[in-house]
Amino acid sequence: MLGTPEIAIRLLLAAALGGVIGFDRERHTWAAGLRTHMLVCLGAALAMIVSAFAFSDILQQWPRVVLDPSRIAAQVISGIGFLGAGTIMFLHRENVIRGLTTAAGLWTVAAIGLAVGGGMYVAAVIATAVAWVILAVLKPLERRFSMRKPLPHVRVGFAGRASLAGIEKVLVGRDLPASTIVTRHVPDDGDEVTVEFTRGFERATLGELADALRGLPGVESVTLDVSEQHGG
């Protein structure tokens, strides 16, 4: 059985390493931030300690009993999925999925906690350093050299039912290559149509397109968005 100082060292180190990963998520205001990552890593370390050492008295009393110290650790890895799934969300207005990186980070933090709980300090520290580099250092490089192109789009709000025929007529009249057209109904507010462009589109024409769309019957608002869309 581990002594109290060793248990304290493992739990405190797990919380600290989880905080290193969580700090980057906190800076970007994701759903799972500093405290969440610290708790996940701490809990995983405690689960590993319990799995490996909590049943030593039973083994001494019953020599024929054989326990697998990895059984609880395996459940941590599979069970962390519910928390990761809670950080993934589909933003219907932007038609993108966000939170995948945070979910992967939680899974990694759980594994780091298991390593600390098992006494593999060096492996835990190295994994934390590599994970921090991936999250904090590589993200600016990913944005700079990403092969994904910006997805400029126009969002049109109607007072009532959307006029898709009118929008299509405006696009065809200007020979604009729309990639997707998504329509959704806003309760108590009318319809909203999002038109995305991905190929052969000049951003300079967005202003003219917005002016033309504002002239359609029933249009209440036209919103332009030329920012890049990334999941995190």
Image (spheres, rainbow, N blue to C red):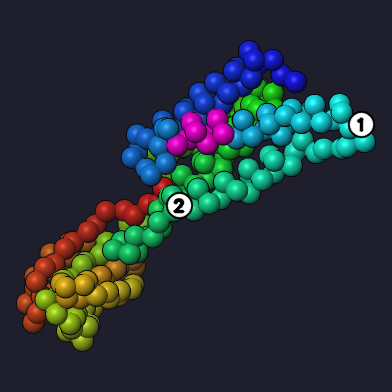
What is the quadrant of residue 58 in the picture? top right
What is the quadrant of residue 195 in the picture? bottom left
Residue most extreme to the right: 64
Dot 2 amino acid type: Gly
Numbered label tally? 2
Residue tagged by mark 2? 86
Magenta segment's dominant SS is: helix
Q: Nearer the viewer, residue 190 or 134?
A: 190
211 displayed left or right of 195: left
User: Magenta span covers which residues?
Assistant: 36-43
Crowding near pointer 2: few (<14 within 10 Å), some, many (20+)?
few
Q: Give the foreground label among 1 and 2.
A: 1
Say if residue 130 shows up in the picture.
Answer: no
Where is residue 141 shown, x and y percent of the image?
A: 42, 39
Q: Nearer the viewer, residue 179 or 222?
A: 222
Q: Cβ–Cβ below 8 Å for labels 1 and 2?
A: no
Residue tagged by mark 1? 63
Question: What residue sits 21% from the left and 67% below the top?
Answer: 155
